[in-house]
Amino acid sequence: MKKVLMTTAAVAAFALTAGTADAAMKKQFISIGTGGVTGVYYPTGGAICRLVNKGRKKHGVRCSVESTGGSVYNINTIRAGELDMGVAQSDWQYHAYNGSGKASFKKVGPFKGLRAVFSVHAEPVSIIARKDAGIKTVDDLVGKRVNIGNPGSGTEATWGVMWAAMGKKNGDLKLVAQMKSAETPSALCDNKIDAFFWLVGNPAALNKEATTTCDAVFATVGNAAVAKLVKEKPYYRWATIPGGMYRGNPKDIKTFGVGATFVSSTRTSSDTVYAVVKAVFDNFKQFKNLHPAFAGLKESEMIKDALSAPLHDGAAKYYKERSWM
Ligand code: GLU
């Protein structure tokens, strides 16, 4: 109603301000959805924003990071237009684009506007248990108190797929906890849960916290049901958590996993995505130094591996300029 009463003068003043801002510089604020603060998504968003903001005088893009519930939340919120970009597991990027895999994704149908930007680090399925819980492999979780991931996390969604593939129901656990990732090490060390399950890059601050505070140990994940998943699904692969990376876990841990990917949508302009991608790859050495999980990253793999949605135009433009495509 108020809008109808806007006077001619107000309209003129409004048009003038908008015009001035436009002329000064196309200032553009973007937010990146990540995960819990002690995971790897949050520092990944931080690293990207840091490089973007360094060049903000040139391109006008101001970047900020949001700690969120994780992959599924990020994809849904990008779809709703409330986040511009986000980090998401490659399995849920695939399912969101195709409208498959999860009841909520099937219900809303394929997210055809979803766009891949680049892939980042590998995310092995990680089961971290109390030393006294007797959990050596994923099969030992039956009858235990387990944190399966908070709603909205890629973790919880992938748990559902893996556990069902093993022919199990959540009722086969003694306790199903759904705390946010950041809360799990203290719950484990305080003996409120026997183990927590999640998918995360390595090294992760949270895993360090659990293994240094209370001698937590990793379990292996490689039974027949998991082998079948890896064989049949393009977004799963075998993975290893290197021995010696975490205190009290000297041996390599065999598991499977996905890739972390950086995504956006057709709602975010080509110029904006171009500026973000350029900030990362023009400063790639610096980017890799911003988190130890980035140590093995290679440009040639990041622009194609683990991506199932089409590349965003703004990203493709930069990759072509570099003759990578
Ligand atoms: N892969 C996790 C998820 O989507 C988040 C991992 C992280 O925070 O680094 O639930």
Image (cartoon, rainbow, N blue to C red):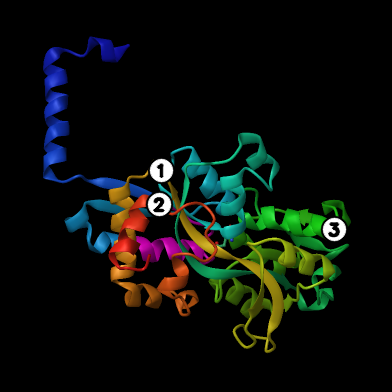
**Residue bearing the label numbered 2:** 312
Q: Are marks 1 and 2 in contact (CB under 8 Å)?
A: yes
Number of marks: 3
Q: Which mark is residue 298?
A: none
Residue 187 visible, this orientation: no
- Tell me which residue sits at (53%, 47%) in the image: 75
Q: Are marks 1 and 3 in contact (CB under 8 Å)?
A: no
Could you tell me residue 79's position as x and y percent?
Answer: 49, 40
**Circle 2 residues within 10 Å: few <14, some 14–19, many ≥20:** many
- Tell me which residue sits at (61%, 37%) in the image: 109
Q: Is the shortest distance between ligand 1 and the CB of mark 3 under 8 Å?
A: no
Q: Quadrant of ligand 1?
A: bottom right
Residue 186 visible, this orientation: yes
- Tell me which residue sits at (78%, 73%) in the image: 222
**Residue bearing the label numbered 3:** 173
Is 286 colored magenta in this rendering?
no
Of the image marks 1 and 3, the number of the one nearer the N terminus: 3
**Residue bearing the label numbered 1:** 266
Q: Is residue 218 left or right of residue 171?
A: left
Q: Is residue 254 left or right of residue 86?
A: right
Q: Which residues are magenta?
A: 32-50
Between residue 36 and residue 240, name the one nearer to us. Answer: 240
Is 33 colored magenta in this rendering?
yes
- Which one is in front in this view, the residue at disc 1 or the one at disc 3? 1
Could you tell me residue 205's position as x and y percent?
Answer: 54, 72
Q: Are marks 3 and 2 in contact (CB under 8 Å)?
A: no
What amino acid type should be assigned to the residue bearing mark 2? His
Mark 1 vs mark 2, CA separation in Å: 7 Å
Indicate whether 111 appears above or below 324.
above
Kind of element beneath mark 2: loop
Q: Is residue 192 left or right of residue 92?
A: right
